[in-house]
Amino acid sequence: MTPLERLPAARQNGKLLPAAADNIAAFLGARLPDWAGAAIGELLAAEAWAELNDRFYRYLEFGTGGMRGRTIGAVPAKAEQGHLGAMGAPQHAAIGSNLMNDFTLVRAVIGLFRYTRTWQQARGMMDPPRFVIAHDMRYFSRHFCELAASTWTRLGGQAYIFDGPRPTPQLSFSVRWLKAQVGVVITASHNPSHDNGFKAYFDDGAQVVPPHDKGIVAEVNAVPLGEIGAFLEISLEGVTVLAWEADDAYLTVAAKAAIDPAVFRGPPLNVVFTNIHGTGAVHVMPLLLHAGCTVHEVREQLVFDPRFPTVKSPNPENAEALSLAVKLAESVGADVVLATDPDCDRMAAAVRNRAGGMELVTGNQIGALLADYRLRKYKELGWIPSEGSPHACIIKTFVTTRLQDAIGRAHGVKVINTLTGFKWIAAKLRGYEEQLRAKLGPDFDYDAAALDERAKLHQRNGSTFFVFGTEESYGYLPNDIVRDKDGNAGCLMFAEVCAWVKRRGLTVPEYLDEIFLQCGFYLEGVINLYYEGATGSAKIKRILETYRSAPPQAFGDVAVTKFQDFGRERILDADGEVIPPQDLYLVTLANGISFAARGSGTEPKMKFYLFAEEQVGSAAELPAIKLRVKAELDRLNRLIEADANQRAGA
């Protein structure tokens, strides 16, 4: 029985989902390489129905971070594995419409090219569209990068690639630097080693947002599978490999993340850095050493390695990923540990406390420390008035600590809340840039203006000067030269805070307590519920749908007093602009604790973000307040998680 002959029976008896059966049939009929058909045949012969459903129940979709999925199946086929390469790399990325592989990548590149060309032509731009591609060190990352470049040039465009792995923020910068129309990073960020992804950027160096994302998706969906085969052989003829000037240009702007370099001239800051096998190894060390830090690398994690062999997960949000760095910090007496994720758009840290131990700092706390410090320094330097300005802002996501809202109020600047994903922060930056361009006319060169000049021009002309941007998941942005979160700049920014604190004779936790005494104590929590595959997707959908159709009324003895549905309500940001509709819910409880609920755009999980706060009368009260708030937050955490699992049917 041929693979195609097995499909009707499997569909009829419920072994295969209808969509999965349709997509398998389409792939088998598309004249793709022999190994691809053989792999599908293996899985059908083995009756690996759950695996086939997960691989084919849909086409890989764009989320808040673009397109991301498995490159290696949970049940790999022998035809895919072939001759294993370096570090255990399979010969082929796994077959499937819902996987990140040659077929979904080529389809995405064709759709992206066609959308970009139409967009150009509507503006009278006749030059071939420019496309910049960066990649991390994951399985197939270099292959996908070269395949994307090859496909683009065959379609008639100009493609630029780097000579090896580079971080996501460098791609964001390079799109503007090269005056390209689009860019892509091949990465799955901090996901498990079996994943990879395709993160798309537009001409402003920011991830795509409406209408571009929807337009690109429509073009991608219109590409027939039969068209893909002609692009599967890679040719790099006509592809430009970027030289050292690209790295120097990015390093120059990344160094501008330090507001007051003189801070580093005191006692040298002793830093331990780990790139957790990722692209942070390229730029973080030069930035820190040039600033004047003493830096110790975690050598076991320095090498590029798609297996991430020294950690359970390459996510610096997880304490375990920093364990080797913390151990080294203890042995060398370091002041701070800095860690970046595989594509170096996130940064995590641990700091030495007054008792002499190393203490992890959350993404929310790092963001709050950076926001307060940078506002203080900008006032000292005269970039913003000492009383603040309605034309200066920090931008954060709705699911990021409310402590930053309080910091903004204390400093007299505007705080903008956006949807989750740095693309929404970048969209605000584009709006501010366009406002200033409209005021100053077509001859004004925004990119040529120095940061201090931009600060004055924005405030003087009624636009908004961007002070700092952050999200709770360890993402930070110091200025609008780069338009995505930047782990390289994040390391330098936080090192500056640590050096400033050290000069004052304080510890970082003591500086955080100073902020609590001024603004109130704020504590956050997060619940991550993982639901894998087609069945997991259905569970996440049930949670989101039941939150809308039957909102929670209480958790234990604590009643719900307010429920906001971002998918149904018209909600405005601090600029008076409408927040795009999304399946995001904000829930406020009678005891003042609140939480947000949303499905992750990049991983198969449901996320809940918890927020608690309490005013502080004196330093003596703070320890007891911390314990009391944490106990209540932990109690509600358990109740919210239990309710979610019940809604999911788990």
Image (cartoon, rainbow, N blue to C red):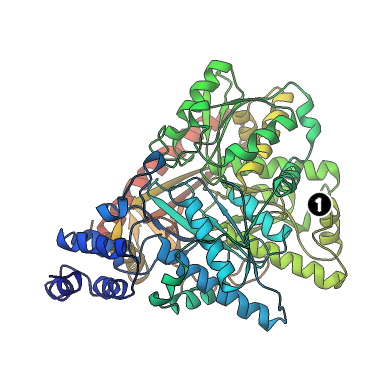
- The quadrant in which residue 209 appears is bottom right
Q: Does residue 65 show up?
A: no
Q: Is residue 639 left or right of residue 570?
A: left
Tell me residue 250's x, y (percent): 71, 48
Tell me residue 294's x, y (percent): 67, 24
Q: Is residue 597 left or right of residue 148?
A: left
**Closer-to-camera residue (163/367):** 163
**Closer-to-camera residue (184/58):** 184
Q: Label 1's element?
A: helix
Tell me residue 375's x, y (percent): 74, 45
Residue at image x 15%, y 61%? 45
Q: Is residue 561 above or below residue 375?
A: below
Residue at image x 45%, y 70%? 107
Q: Quadrant of the C terminus?
A: bottom left
Residue linked to disc 1: 451
Tell me residue 70's x, y (percent): 37, 55
**Closer-to-camera residue (389/491):** 491
**Closer-to-camera residue (552/453):** 453
Q: Is residue 525 left or right of residue 212?
A: left
- The quadrant in which residue 236 appears is bottom right
Q: Does residue 204 show up?
A: yes
**Amino acid beneath label 1:** Leu
Residue at image x 81%, y 69%? 437
